[in-house]
Image (cartoon, coloured by chain):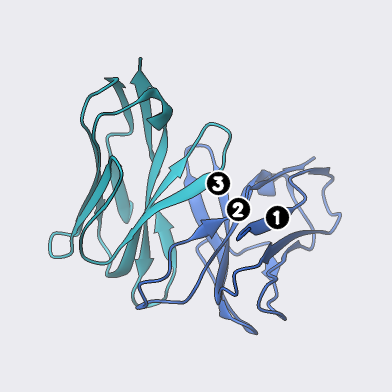
Chain colours: A blue, B cyan
Amino acid sequence: EAQVTQNPRYLITVTGKKLTVTCSQNMNHEYMSWYRQDPGLGLRQIYYSMNVEVTDKGDVPEGYKVSRKEKRNFPLILESPSPNQTSLYFCASSLTAPPSGANVLTFGAGSRLTVL
Amino acid sequence: KNEVEQSPQNLTAQEGEFITINCSYSVGISALHWLQQHPGGGIVSLFMLSSGKKKHGRLIATINIQEKHSSLHITASHPRDSAVYICAVRGWRDDKIIFGKGTRLHILP
C-alpha cells in the first residue's frame, strides 16, 4: 500500500531531551515536507526537501533540523525540545516539484508531541 | 493579512444542501490544494489544481488564476462530509506551501 509512515504517533518528552520523528514513504516521491498544526494557527510548513541532499526552510524552521540522505526518509529532529514545540506534526510527500501535474500531497497519520 | 484566506470559517448545513467553500490567496502560485481533515486528525488530499476545474464524485474544485481565487463545492452534502477543509497554495518562486486556517463543515442529518 502506498503510504507515508510517521513514528512515533504519540510522544511525551521533557525539555531539552533530543528526539527524532521519522517519516518514510514507499512511493519513490521526490518532494517531502514537514508541518506542524496548532489550534488557531492551522498548518505551517517547517522544512521541505525537493530531492536527496536538498532541503529548504519553510515558515517555522526554528528549533528543528532535517536531513534527506535517502529518497524515502525525511526525519525531523528536535535537538533541544521546548514546550512551544508541543504540537501535532505531519509529514507529507509528492511525486515531483512543480510544474508537473502529478504532485498531489500524501500525508502521514500525524505525530502528537508533548514537551513538558 | 494572511496570504491564504478561507471563508467561511465555520459552516453548518442540512443534509442534501449544496456547499461552497472559498479560498483567496495573494501570492503567485504553481498549484493549489484542497485538503480534508476528519475529526480523527488524518489529512487527505482532495484536489490539486493549477487551472480550470476538477470533479471527483460529489466534489468539484475550481480555480481562477487571474482573480487568485478557488472554490470547493460539495453537491448533495452528507453527514460524512463533516470535516475541516483546508486550502493550501504552493509558491511558484520558492515551492513553499502556505495553508489557509480551514473551514469547519458540519452537515446535519
**Amino acid beneath label 2:** Phe
| Tag 2 residue | A90
Residue drawn 52% across the image and 58% down it: A106
Pointer 3 with pointer 2, Cβ within 8 A = yes
Residue drawn 13% across the image and 65% down it: B66
Question: In the picture provided, is B104 more to the left or to the right than A20?
Answer: left
Q: Residue A6 carries which label?
A: 1
Q: How far apart are marks 1 and 3 (CA)?
A: 15 Å
In which quadrant of the rendered image does the C terminus of chain B lie?
top left
Q: In this view, does B80 lie above or below A28?
A: above
The answer for which chain carries disc 3 is A
Quarter occupied by residue B42:
top right
Q: Mark 3 Cα within 10 Å, few/some/many (few <14, many 20+)?
A: some
Q: Position of residue A98 (x, y in %)?
A: 38, 76
Q: Mark 2 Cα within 10 Å, few/some/many (few <14, many 20+)?
A: many
Q: Earlier in the sequence, mark 3 or mark 2?
A: 3
Q: Earlier in the sequence, mark 1 or mark 2?
A: 1
Helix, strand, or loop for circle 1? strand
Q: Residue B52 carries which label?
A: none
Helix, strand, or loop for circle 3? strand
| Tag 3 residue | A37
Residue B1 in view (yes/no): no
Q: Is B70 in front, or is B54?
A: B54
Answer yes or no: are tags 1 and 2 on the same subunit. yes
